[in-house]
Amino acid sequence: MIRITVSEDTLRNALVAGLDASQQSNIVGAGGATPAITVSSHISGSAVTQFANDLCSSAQAIPMAVPSDGILAVESQEWGTQSLPQLRCIEGIPGAGDTVRLGGNVSGAGVLVVKNAELIASGLFRWEGLIIVTGSNVGFTILGPETKDIYGSLMVNETGTPGSETAILDIRGSMRLFFSRIALGRITALIPTSTMNNAYGFLPSHVTQDYWRAMTP
């Protein structure tokens, strides 16, 4: 099951409109409400943008750019493993409708950041860690019957004003998304301390205290 939060009603309505009945029934929230696409202020769009920019400014980042024809095709690549995760940053042109197409058999572990481009997975795809798609005219699209598995977390952050024809989340094939603390834990070494410090102020927090001393009535 997938739970989705957005920053405003306009984006929520656009997401719901882009899902068919069967897709909506697979997005289930608290109390069984469907589709569980809700407005949340826990992490703002600007915070995701800053986090992505800070990651891509890191010395560990492996930069890539969408070529001038607007399409970056990636075929049968392995970008990182559990023991050696990678930080990959792919840059498109804002507002240009660029796309990053993953085909064949693409796998990886670490952090994948796609900026100002739509990310399309059409072949076998497996990622362990964090995927961030952020910027203007962005989206995440699944095509084809091949298995697509994400272990960790996926963030899609549209910063522009998408039109009615824009599908921010378009699932037209098989996809499984599993939240994984283990997979996310493996990427911590890829995140600079300064980047994490900048993110702390935006993260939701919940603090509990267990009293250590035995109590007697």
Image: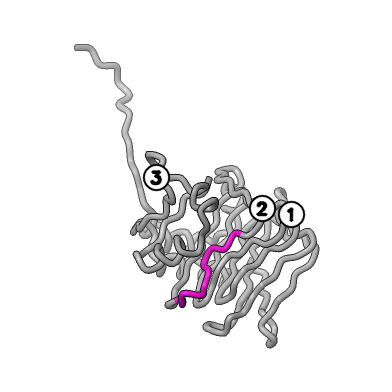
Position in image of residue 126 (x %, y %): 70, 53
Residue at 55% in and 59% down: 191
Give me the residue at 46% from left, 74% from top: 164
Mark 1 residue type: Glu
Tell whether 89 sits left or right of 45: right
Identify the residue position indicated by label 2 in the image: 174
How far apart are the two marked residues, 3 and 1, measured between alpha carbons? 29 Å
- Considering every residue shown, the one lying at the far left of the view is 217
Residue behind mark 3: 33
Distance from disc 2 to disc 1, alpha carbons, whole Å, reads 6 Å
Which residue is identified by label 1?
Answer: 146
Label number found at residue 16: none
Element type where label 2 sits in the image = loop
Q: Residue at x 61, y 53 (%)?
A: 129
* Residue located 40% across and 57% down the image: 200
Q: Is residue 88 left or right of residue 73?
A: left
At which x and y percent is residue 24?
A: 49, 52
- The image quarter in which residue 40 lies: bottom left
